[in-house]
Image (cartoon, rainbow, N blue to C red):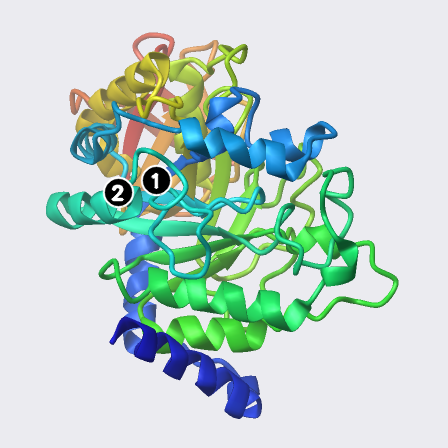
Amino acid sequence: MKRIMQAAALALLLIAPSAVKAQYVPSEENLKSRQEFADSKFGIFIHWGIYSMFAQGEWYLQNYPIDKNEYAKVADAFYPHRFNAKEWVAAIKDAGAKYICFTSRHHDSFSMWDTEQSDYNIVDATPFGRDVIKELAEECHKQGIRLHFYYSHIDWARDEYPLGRTGTQVIGRDKAKADWPAYYNFMNAQLTELLTNYGEIGAIWFDGKWDRDQDSIPFNWQLDEQYALIHKLQPQCLIGNNHHETPFPGEDIQIFERDLPGENKAGLSGQDVSCLPLETCQTMNGMWGYKLVDQNYKSTETLLRLLVSTSGKGANLLLNVGPQPNGEIPAVALERMKEMGQWLRTNGETVYGTIAGDIPAQDWGVTTRKGNRLFVHIFDCKEKELTLPLDCKVKKAFTYSYKQPVKFKKTKDGVKLMFNEVPSGIDYIIELITK
């Protein structure tokens, strides 16, 4: 039955490609899912695959002249005996995150589920023999955490994928076997599995379109048909594409890599900011996949301010962890997540379900809004007063934590807050009731 459903879905694409060219109109389920996504504000990204065995990050196959067949042999030793989906999801939920985005298949071609489209997967190619996506999906559904799937549009090991600007140094590929139609059908068959066999999925997070951004003739990724397949299989499933461009028709969220919306410090996010729900992805240390020598983890203060600053832009933070080859989340990452969760249990109301605040990011901090409540998040203020460039009328002002009144007055420059002491701490929050 599973194969029949997959074949039917693929037949829809082959028989009626013009039907999916019509203007995309999101379903009611999709619009509801968008709002729930926008309100969630915090997710955990998980980069995990056989590349963790090399402890050199997820781009190891690309970054060194490696024979793809020699690289693949590590799968025979991949036995993450300490992987425990229940513990993973519980720790992520305790961190205050509302969803997980898991790398189902990265650029190295290895699939982390029991796919019928290739034997190069965690069930057939490893002694572990367990479908970690199945276990993760079951726990997410039990514990009330949404599950998203990262899926690579490119493949450094599969000959059918026509190489772009990356993967060209991988040894053992037969360029004569490049076959986009075959590869495209392979991807859609895998996506059909992911959206058919693992319950309700929150989003598909694509990556890799940038691989052919230097082609003299624009490459046709056939995204319209692929997006239509996903929305047909699960109408509520959101689609995001980390292509570093303004969103295309059929996409439901906009992704920014290593940058807040409207910023481009990392050089990957120069695109315009759309009206779609927004998400920025960032690493907890330096790499996405596990790298043994990368212990340069950001402090809890830095991570919390990043989360609040992202919320101040009206966006979600997708914060990455790279599990170890034995299946454990690194201890430092768990510590950071636990501390973030502790802070969010006290202050999460000023983050979850908010929109971008009235005041753009300032040297002193950011603002978030929920109805008539404006939350002023102060990171760095060296005086006992702070002038907010506000046009709205302020009825009340008080500290969020202790509900102590804060004096304020209207000035020609906005509203001046006057404190009893210089604000300090990770995030000194003032709540304003506005009219």
Which residue: 40% across, 47% down? 392
**Label 2 CA crowd tier, 10 Å (few <14, some 14–19, many 20+):** many
In the depicted structure, whether residue 5 falls above or below residue 206: below
Q: Quadrant of residue 201?
A: bottom left
Marks 2,1: beta carbons within 8 A: yes
Residue 169, percent from left and from top: 77, 37
Give me the disc on residue 61: none
C-alpha span from label 2 to label 1: 6 Å
- Identify which amino acid the numbered label 1 is placed on: Gly
Q: Position of residue 400 (x, y in %)?
A: 22, 27
| Residue furthest out toward the left | 142
In the drawing, does residue 404 fall left or right of residue 167?
left
Residue 108 can be seen, yes or no:
yes
**Residue at horizontal 76 percent and vertical 52 percent from the top:** 164
Q: Position of residue 65 (x, y in %)?
A: 74, 30
- From this view, report whether residue 352 is shown above or below residue 58: below
Tag 2's secondary structure? loop
* Residue drawn at x 37%, y 46% as measured from the top left: 124
Mark 1 Cα shell of 10 Å, populated few (<14), some (14-19), many (≥20): many
Which label is found at residue 98? 2
Q: Amino acid at mark 2?
A: Lys
As drawn, is 34 to the left or to the right of 150? Answer: left
Q: Residue under circle 1?
A: 43
Foreground of the two, 401 or 283: 283
Residue 358 image position (x, y, % from top left): 44, 45
Q: Secondary structure at mark 1?
A: strand
5 or 350, nearer to the observer: 5
